[in-house]
Amino acid sequence: MNIALIGTGYVGLTTGVALAFMGHETTCLDVDADRIRDLEDGIMPFYEPHLADMFRLVRSRLHFHTGYDAIASANVVFITVGTPPGEDGAPDLRYVRSAAEAIGKNLKNSYTVVVNKSTVPIGSGNWVESLIRESYESVHGTKPNGRFSVASNPEFLREGAALQDTLYPDRVVIGASDSRAIEVLHGLYRPILEQAFNPPAFLPRPESMGAAPLIATGLQSAELVKYAANAFLSLKVSYINEIAQLAERVGADISEIAKGIGLDRRIGTQFLQAGVGWGGSCFGKDTSALISTGGEYGVEMSIVCASRRVNYRQRELVVEKLLHNLKILKGRTIGLLGLAFKPNTDDLRDSPALDIAKRLAQRGANVRAHDPIAMPRAKEDPAWANVTLCESVETMASGSDALVLVTDWPHYRKLDWPAIGVEMRNRLVVDGRNYLDPCGVRTAGFEYVGFGR
Ligand code: NAD
């Protein structure tokens, strides 16, 4: 098939590369001309494991453009533009609007399926359809009857495991009111659903992987599945963080509690790590969008509100733990281990590290930070201008009063704590992910402070 994707971010580029791997001629479109030029030269716009490897494998089937001509011959057009949070918590849909208008102007095939893969509020499928219809009519002077259908295909990939999740998904959700659209997308996803492709050597098929179920739904259900999934995951993390606060008071250990409840199959062990909480481009904006949609329909999303409240409080808890141990933050030097919102990505959107850095700076501390991968991005981003970015953990630790682990990069588990402690003014580690070995850190002469332990 001919596939076009509008937006070459984490979702668009990963999906495009994976579909090219399945044998489709794939055109990736973006308004960012620098990004398109880099992609033509094989330069990835962000760090994502194995993406560059697969890109090289399928390069001959991948095409990159800033214009929208490729829509004319596409059987399927994916909208994969960003939907960042607006001022009022509802998503800013201006990029979706411009993508939909471009599709309407450029449709030429006898039948094209337009797929909303961006995370969009309930009802957006109908809205996108009307935008495409109107812009088609404005250019062609006729109605586009039967020429296109709109489907919703929410994306569940995790940054840092984006290709893994695309090739080996738990499920594929497709929402549409038109069975023809579901049929086309079923055909497109069949190799993935049936696991009928030869896995690349660098991403072997997990042994436990069988066929992936296709969940065919109406448009609204597919749109709501995405928000409901992210909100549920966010509240699992917030729940364990709330229990961690209690565990700390009563002298219990949250990692024992997480194991004790997580091995109950109804609960599951994932997303039960206490610490500084979630960040990133999705959970914050999607929970806020869900609350906003609930408000529009008169449903108070009280559990989702609580999840957000607990989550953002965790960042302040880091500052309180430092204050408790150092007594005074003014003039102290604090080093943050990790800038990215989670390991294996250089995505800095809604990064807990940045929020913690701002809170510390407000109290007069000097903030330093290190990250194994995300430093180049932070250097380009003015939001990090008041943080001293250090090329090594050792440089950052020298003369510091405390280190805070914010991102659980495997790199930080292998640190030589005795060597790091030598040059520190004060040996304190706040482990914001309960990730380090407390014994090893304490043996090196550090005070170790975790969350809920
Ligand atoms: P992103 O910000 O990384 O990329 C979006 C891209 O779209 C940018 O390169 C931008 O230049 C381009 N763009 C914007 N308007 C355009 C237009 N009119 N024409 C062509 N290109 C245009 O976004 P992302 O992280 O890939 O997220 C995309 C969507 O997928 C969002 O709705 C997000 O919520 C959702 N999502 C993201 C993730 C994730 O982990 N990042 C996971 C699941 C779902």
Image (tube, rainbow, N blue to C red):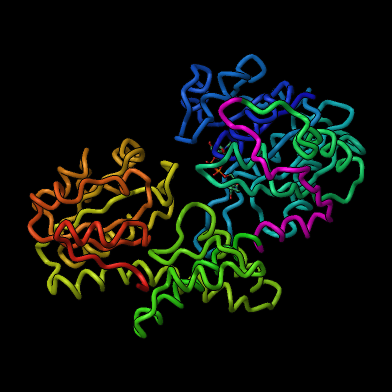
Q: Position of residue 448 (x, y in %)?
A: 23, 65
In the displayed structure image, the side of residue 262 where residue 450 appears, left or right: left
Q: Nearer the viewer, residue 17 or 89?
A: 17
Q: Nearer the viewer, residue 303 or 148?
A: 303
Instruction: Give the residue at x 32% y 38%.
Output: 380
Instruction: Give the residue at x 84% y 56%.
Output: 218
- Determine the image quadrant of residue 319: bottom left
Q: Position of residue 451 (x, y in %)?
A: 35, 69
Figure check: 212 above or below 445:
above
Q: Is residue 383 visible?
A: no
Instruction: Give the residue at x 26% y 73%.
Output: 320
Q: Position of residue 441 (x, y in %)?
A: 23, 58
Considering every residue shown, the one lying at the far bottom of the view is 250
Magenta-colored span: 201-228
Instruction: Give the residue at x 57% y 33%.
Output: 8
**Magenta residue check for 218:** yes
- Determine the image quadrant of residue 217: bottom right
Q: Position of residue 368 (x, y in %)?
A: 20, 50
Figure check: 290 above or below 99:
below
Considering every residue shown, the one lying at the far top of the view is 60
Ligand 1 falls in quadrant: top right
Figure check: 449 above or below 369:
below
Name the image quarter holding the N terminus. Answer: top right
**Magenta residue check for 92:** no
In the displayed structure image, the side of residue 181 where residue 322 appears, left or right: left
